[in-house]
């Protein structure tokens, strides 16, 4: 889960609080809290409290995390190339449209449980 959180923070820099990670990734508070503590102990992240709002604690990726994140990004890009290999532009457009519809349906369904 620690790796997933690092990649999430890198790919979604505007969602940089524990609460946002829980909400968007549909994770439990305890798992996110434990993972963040482990990442902090390893020197991969830092928690910074806002001067304006003491309740707002941003999670910042540190330089030490960049190697892991860069390798992860390369793996993600290669995976995308591998699974889309041989598809025409038209097929890729259709695939994208189908996945967008699936995503919209999943979001609607998840909102029903909130």
Image: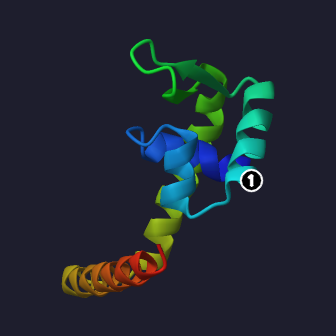
- Residue 34 % position (x, y): 78, 44
Residue 4 sits above or below residue 101 on the image = above
Is 29 on the left or on the right of 49, as rendered? right
- Residue 44 % position (x, y): 68, 28
Using the rendered image of the protein, determine whether residue 36 is visible from the camera's viewpoint: yes
- Residue 5 % position (x, y): 62, 47
Judging by the rendered image, the residue that carries numbered circle 1 is 31
Q: Which one is in front, 53 or 97?
A: 53
- Residue 2 % position (x, y): 72, 47
Rendering colour mode: rainbow
Helix, strand or loop at disc 1? Answer: helix
Q: Residue at x 80, y 36 (%)?
A: 38
Q: Which one is in front, 18 or 76?
A: 18
The quarter holding residue 35 reads top right
Q: Which one is in front, 38 or 96?
A: 38
Is 89 on the left or on the right of 12, as rendered? left
Q: Residue at x 54, y 60 (%)?
A: 25
The quarter holding residue 40 reads top right
Q: Residue at x 48, y 28 (%)?
A: 56
The quarter holding residue 33 reads top right
The quadrant of the image that shows the N terminus is: bottom right
- Label 1 crowding class (10 Å Cα cut-off): few <14, some 14-19, many 20+? few
Using the rendered image of the protein, determine whether residue 73 is visible from the camera's viewpoint: no
Is 90 on the left or on the right of 102, as rendered? left
Is 83 on the left or on the right of 90, as rendered? right
Residue 9 sits above or below residue 66 on the image = below
């Amino acid at each position: 889960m620690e790796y997933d959180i690092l990649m999430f923070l890198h790919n979604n820099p505007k969602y940089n609080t524990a609460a946002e990670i829980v909400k968007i990734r549909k994770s439990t508070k305890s798992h996110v809290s434990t993972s963040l503590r482990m990442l902090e102990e390893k020197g991969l992240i830092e928690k910074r409290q806002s001067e304006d709002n003491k309740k707002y604690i941003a999670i910042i990726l540190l330089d030490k995390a960049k190697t892991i994140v860069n390798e992860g990004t390369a793996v993600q890009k290669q995976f995308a190339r591998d699974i889309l290999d041989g598809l025409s532009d038209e097929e890729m457009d259709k695939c994208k449209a189908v996945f967008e519809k699936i995503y919209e349906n999943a979001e609607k369904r998840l909102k029903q449980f909130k």
